[in-house]
Image: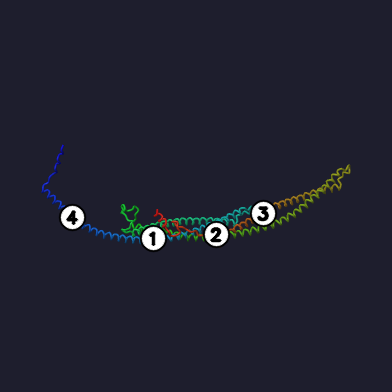
Amino acid sequence: MSALPVKPGLRHSVSEWNSNNHQLSATAQHERYVSSVIRQEGRSLRNKTNCQTTWDESDTCRRLRDRAWDVARRKEELETCAQRVDEEMEALTLSKERAEQALAATAVPLEVGGECLTLRDGRRGCELAVDPVDEQLKKEVALIERMQQVLQQHIDEAFEQLCVLQEARHQLTTDLQNKMDALDIDMSCLSLTIKSPQISLKTNPTRIPSCSSTPQEWAQFSQYNVARAQEAMQVSQQMREHTSLTRAQLQNELDTQRRATEFALRKRIHHEEQARDELEWQIRNTEDEMAEMGRDIHGLDADVQAKTASLKLAHTRLENRTSRAGMDLCRDEVQHGLVNEVHQLEATIRALKQKLSEAQHSMQKMKLHHSRMLQDLSRKQEALSLEQRSVNTRSRLPTTSSTEKTPMLLVPLTNSSGRSNLQLLAQEHETGSSL
């Protein structure tokens, strides 16, 4: 079966063909005209934008240089202030250490004062008297305790002020580090050119960061940090002067009170020695009197024994004569004499016994008083021993000259960034950049 012939397309006339050719020529001429205009405008725009770009780049470089100069000037101001803060922190720390040494130096005087009071509380009897030594010792202990409280208060205030200075120093360090980073970034931007390999298109580069600040806020922030540090340094200087003056005044008061206590102690020892010597003299005289009284008591007792023997003889004679018988039992002169002798002996014995009793009572009272005097002498000697121990204990007190000659131990200080100078966080910054 043979294939069917293809149906021919739509036929155009000659006029349509000529019209189509004319339209193509006219469109080509119009497009060439438009292209020529666009080329001229493009060349003009290129020249204009090249000039504008060159000018903008130059102006940006100028602005970067001006900004770098402002940042560098502000950085130098912050460095100078930070250096002064470091020096003030070292001075305040030294003042605090001296106050701590003065506070530590009060431990021995307080211990000595308490030990002296404890030793003197060991006195017994009438020797346990509230004397001027007790008053001066209590005043000295109270002064030392007040001195400790005042010094501890100054130490606490110095510590708090050091924290304030350290915080101000941290703010200065942070601001200074930011200035250094900003200066590095601006100098890096200033060194970039269109031929630098680091340049590239970024996503939304014209955005405004959320934490952006105005130039006025930027200047005020650094000024506030510097003013805050200067105010803290002024307070620290006043605190150091006040602490030094207070330490000197308290030391003078303590030295004055110490001399008053030692004078009262020496005076009390002198009075106790006088009392001891007087009591020893009284004891010796009392012992002599007791020895004499003992001999007299022995003599009285011997006389009583002798008179008792005579009375026995008279009684025996009278009793034996009652055995006479009859009219020989006569009350003769012998009888009357014996009766009178018995009465006389009995009266003599009673008188001797009375006197012996009085002598023994007096002897007993002297022995009792002698025992009391011996006890009091023992207490006085013990009190003198305690006073001497107090004197020896007070010899542990440091003298003013020795404390002034004691060298001060200086401890090296570090600032808030862990450095002893103005070496800021350059190494850490480099480490962070490498990471």
Q: What residue type is labelled 2?
A: Leu
Task: Identify whether 314 is placed above or below 220.
Answer: above
SS at badge 2 = helix
Task: Give the x, y percent position of residue 181.
Answer: 38, 57
Q: Mark 2 points at which residue?
A: 254
Q: What residue type is labelled 3?
A: Ser
Single out the residue that lies furthest toward the front.
1
Q: Earlier in the sequence, mark 1 or mark 3?
A: 1
Q: Mark 4 points at which residue?
A: 32
Q: Name the residue under label 3.
A: 378
Judge depth for marks 2 and 4 and give the one in front.
Answer: 4
Q: Can residue 75 be seen in this view?
A: yes
Q: Which amino acid does label 1 sit on?
A: Lys
Q: Is residue 161 left or right of residue 269?
A: left
Task: Give the x, y percent position of residue 80.
Answer: 41, 61
Whole-number angstrom distance, CA of label 2 to CA of label 4: 110 Å
